[in-house]
């Protein structure tokens, strides 16, 4: 089956960081197999070679909800995508290597400069019986671009028109063109298809979120509770029912501290676990663990529009003030890669020249602060949700290191939901705080990270500022057909972001650890809370261990 114009194939292969299996090496091999079983952590094989009959009625319990909205166009929390993808099928899917493959669109190609055409899957209906067709695609894209409640408009900013060619063909006019990035964009929220009839009947994003209707493998059962619980169940009429191996999924909010105990008690079947839980999980014969590298990053995020971070010298001093190798070792038991930039080794946007741009040097940090007019150092406030134990630990370690370089960070623990609103702002309130020790969710492509974090209209850019020249480089990279040209432009963009010390200080790239009962099969890779998928997961009949 053809799923992309052949001239795009090498370009798409470079568009994302391949996920590599974790190992003891601090220098991951970018060409390693992302599905390799992880034995470096002392675990038994996470994907055994045998096969056991699966139970198609089994309800899998997964221990991470964070969902405050179930409408794809209105994102409240990044982790919502984990639940959304069980309800809404996207136009394009990503495989285990994060490469674009068919979803509700079976193939796509560039038909003219700045024009892409997508062929849609036939005989698909939404769970309310509404047909899925080109008109439904046009409705969803128009809604994401123009609805007053949409906060994902920036991702479709280059879409100039959506044309219905016929019932199962839709054409996009793109200016500037972005043939490498656009299919990946349609694997995320903009490509999650909602029933037009259900959206119209709901009348608002909030009402639709209460009872969402998609064409995905599951439907929401009963009422769901923000940040607490969502239950989804299989429904008759799903177009790909033979590949759906579960009867449903219960998403149950579980703190990271309680996750391992819940797995061991049988209260959960699958769960993302932190690095410090991996050893104990591997030692438990009832569990298996799959670990993979990711491009999710832990960082000290800043708002560079707020004093003192409005001075590039202060931002650069902040970079020199933190020993990222020591932080990664202390917080991840050496399982994660320290970050010298916003992209890990193996990413098309990674630049070896930036690896030594900001060595740990507290004295240089003090010099830069003095040059910026702060000879006695600076004081700033950082906030973090008090229930985010891993982030609190990270904040305390960062706080101690910064003290040695002239920074006094007042770390405040507040309600998690309030903290995010205070960091990024809301429609009714601008950002309130200068910094937060937090995470950047996995980026599906380098340009996504730039657009979300560094463009003035990026949903995770609290400063509302763009580094001069950065947008042109990223837009040029997405329009490039030649993979070498694309890579060069992305590395230039990374160098510019580094020189300006924008967005904060990258600390380490998170290793994804998916822990599961021994009776759970089909896990393809280790995941974080933001990139877990359930395609291919199953529970064995009688919950016997997977052979």
Image (cartoon, rainbow, N blue to C red):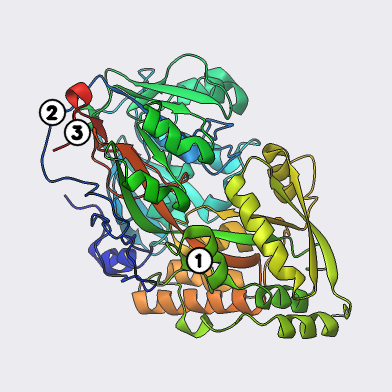
The image shows residue 43 at horizontal and vertical percentages of 28, 51
Which residue is under mark 3? Answer: 545
Q: First in sequence: mark 3 or mark 2? A: 2
Q: Residue furthest top?
A: 222
SS at badge 1: helix
Which residue is under mark 2? Answer: 53
Q: Quadrant of residue 445?
A: bottom left
Residue 59 is tagged as none
Q: How busy is the neighbourhood of tag 2: few (under 14 within 10 Å), some, or many (20 plus)?
A: few
Residue nearest the observer in this picture, 153 or 75: 75
Q: Position of 420 compared to 512: left or right? A: right
Q: Which dot, 3 or 2, sits closer to the camera?
A: 3
Q: Quadrant of residue 271?
A: top left
Report, in whole angstroms, how far the alpha carbon at label 1 lies from the one at label 3.
34 Å
Residue 448: tell me if it is visible: no
Residue nearest the observer in this picture, 261 or 237: 261
Q: Quadrant of the C terminus?
A: top left
Residue 329 is tagged as 1
SS at badge 2: loop
Q: Is residue 151 above or below residue 32?
A: above
Report, in whole angstroms, how far the alpha carbon at label 3 lies from the one at label 2.
11 Å
Q: How busy is the neighbourhood of tag 1: few (under 14 within 10 Å), some, or many (20 plus)?
A: some
Q: First in sequence: mark 1 or mark 3? A: 1
Q: First in sequence: mark 1 or mark 2? A: 2
Q: Which dot, 1 or 2, sits closer to the camera?
A: 1
SS at badge 3: loop
């Amino acid at each position: 089956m053809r799923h992309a114009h052949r001239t795009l194939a090498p370009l798409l292969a470079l568009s994302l960081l391949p996920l590599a299996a974790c190992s003891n090496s601090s220098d991951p091999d970018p060409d390693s197999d992302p599905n390799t079983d992880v034995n470096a952590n002392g675990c038994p094989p996470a994907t055994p070679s045998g096969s056991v009959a699966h139970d198609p009625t089994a309800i899998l319990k997964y221990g991470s909800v964070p969902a405050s909205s179930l409408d794809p166009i209105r994102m409240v929390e990044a982790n919502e995508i984990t639940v959304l993808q069980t309800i809404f099928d996207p136009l394009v899917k990503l495989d285990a290597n994060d490469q674009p493959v068919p979803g509700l669109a079976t193939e796509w190609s560039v038909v003219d400069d700045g024009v892409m055409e997508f062929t849609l899957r036939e005989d698909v209906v939404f769970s309310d019986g509404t047909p899925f067709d080109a008109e439904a695609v046009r409705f969803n894209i128009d809604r994401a671009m123009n609805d007053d409640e949409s906060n994902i408009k920036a991702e479709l900013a280059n879409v100039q028109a959506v044309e219905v060619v016929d019932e199962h063909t839709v054409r996009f006019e793109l200016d500037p063109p972005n043939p490498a990035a656009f299919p990946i964009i349609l694997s995320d929220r903009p490509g999650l298809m909602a029933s037009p009839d259900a959206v119209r009947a709901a009348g608002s994003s909030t009402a639709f979120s209460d009872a969402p209707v998609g064409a995905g493998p599951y439907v929401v059962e009963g009422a769901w509770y923000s940040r607490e619980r969502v239950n989804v169940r299989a429904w008759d009429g799903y177009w790909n029912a033979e590949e759906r191996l579960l009867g449903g999924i219960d998403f149950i909010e579980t703190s990271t501290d309680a996750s391992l105990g819940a797995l061991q008690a049988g209260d959960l079947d699958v769960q993302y676990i932190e690095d410090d839980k991996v050893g104990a999980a591997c030692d438990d014969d009832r569990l298996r663990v799959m670990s993979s590298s990711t491009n999710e990053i832990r960082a000290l995020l800043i708002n560079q529009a707020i004093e003192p971070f409005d001075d590039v010298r202060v931002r650069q001093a902040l970079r020199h003030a933190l020993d990222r190798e020591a932080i990664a070792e202390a917080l991840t038991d050496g399982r994660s890669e320290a970050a010298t930039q916003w992209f890990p080794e193996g990413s098309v946007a990674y630049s070896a020249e930036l690896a030594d741009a900001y060595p740990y040097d507290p004295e240089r940090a003090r010099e830069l602060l003095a040059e910026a007019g702060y000879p006695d150092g600076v004081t700033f406030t950082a906030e973090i949700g008090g229930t985010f134990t891993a982030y609190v630990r990270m904040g305390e370690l960062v706080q101690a290191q910064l003290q040695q370089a002239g920074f006094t960070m007042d770390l405040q623990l507040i309600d998690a939901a309030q903290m995010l609103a205070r960091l990024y702002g809301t429609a009714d309130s601008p950002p309130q705080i200068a910094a937060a020790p937090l995470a950047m969710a996995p980026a599906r492509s380098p340009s996504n990270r730039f657009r979300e974090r560094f463009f003035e209209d990026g949903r995770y850019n609290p400063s509302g500022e763009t580094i001069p020249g950065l947008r042109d480089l990223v837009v040029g990279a997405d329009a490039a057909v030649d993979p070498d040209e694309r890579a060069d432009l992305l590395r230039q963009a990374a160098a510019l972001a580094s020189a300006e010390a924008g967005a904060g200080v990258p600390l380490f790239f998170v290793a994804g650890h998916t822990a599961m009962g021994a009776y759970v099969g089909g896990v393809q890779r280790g995941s974080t809370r933001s990139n877990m998928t359930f395609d291919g997961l199953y529970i064995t009949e009688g919950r016997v261990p997977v052979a």
